[in-house]
Image: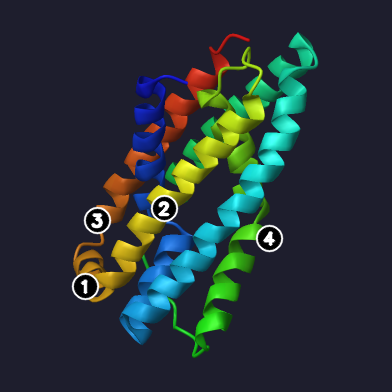
Amino acid sequence: MTATTLFYFLCASAALTISPGPDNLFVLTQGIARGRKPAIVTALGMCSGVTVHTALAALGISAIFHSSILAFNVVKYAGAAYLIYLAYKTLSERSTVRLAEAVDLPTFSLYKRGFIMNVLNPKVAMFFLAFLPQFVAPTSEHVSLQMLVLGLIFMLQAIVIFCLIGYFAGSVGQFILSRPKMAKYLDWLTAGVFVSLGLRLALAER
């Protein structure tokens, strides 16, 4: 992986993490309703779940990359199609930012809840299978290591962004709620990122 690839990966990851979704809106909810600490603990739990998805993706994709061109192309085009589908879903289901009610839970329960929410979400697993391979050099002998590094980078940037959302939850929440049209532009940003990643994956060479 080159420095340019890592930079592109970090930018794409940050853009997708910031875009409205169940995870960051749940963190936002916890911060507004319960305070900074519950929001940050929840965020850490969610981000910890990334390690599981990264490990599974690394084990599966690395084997496929080294098996055959046909297998590589099947995964490549399936991943590209899924990312473009996510772009379509983003625009067709225009998200209206709403805040759910927070639930009173002790610190460990909040962490565990965030972790389980992430690990048991099949959409997250599918996303990592489609997202990470785009930034890996498939001809390298260290495909699994590359994916683990990318997963670690994704987790770290998600921790920073989620914790900032939790810390400034009150201000962030009021800002979003007072500007409902903002979600529309974030939807277009998210869709654009998904489409560009999907096209990049479809055009990738083994």
Q: Judge the density around disc 2: few (<14), some (14-19), many (≥20) Cα neighbours within 10 Å.
A: many
Disc 1 versus disc 2: distance between alpha carbons? 22 Å
Residue at the disc numbered 4: 120
Mark 3 vs mark 1: in front: 1
Horizontal placement of 128 versus 168: left or right? Answer: right
Residue at the disc numbered 1: 174
Mark 1 vs mark 2: in front: 2
Horizontal placement of 107 versus 59: left or right? Answer: left
Quadrant housing residue 138: top right
Residue at the disc numbered 3: 181
The residue tagged with tag 4: helix, strand or loop? loop
Relative image position of residue 172 (x, y in whole percent): 23, 67
Relative image position of residue 110 (x, y in whole percent): 53, 79
Going by the numbered disc 4, the residue's amino acid type is Leu
Mark 4 vs mark 3: in front: 4
Whether residue 19 is visible to the viewer of this picture, yes or no, is no
Relative image position of residue 88 (x, y in whole percent): 50, 38
Disc 4 versus disc 2: distance between alpha carbons? 18 Å
Mark 4 vs mark 1: in front: 4
Quadrant housing residue 181: bottom left
Whether residue 76 is visible to the viewer of this picture, yes or no, is yes
Q: Which of 124 and 9 is in front in this view?
A: 9
> Which residue appears at 20% of the width and 62% of the height?
179
- Disc 4 and disc 2 in contact, CB within 8 angstroms: no
Q: Is residue 145 above or below residue 53?
A: above
Residue at the disc numbered 2: 158
Q: Is residue 114 above or below residue 55?
A: below
Disc 4 versus disc 3: distance between alpha carbons? 31 Å
The residue tagged with tag 3: helix, strand or loop? loop
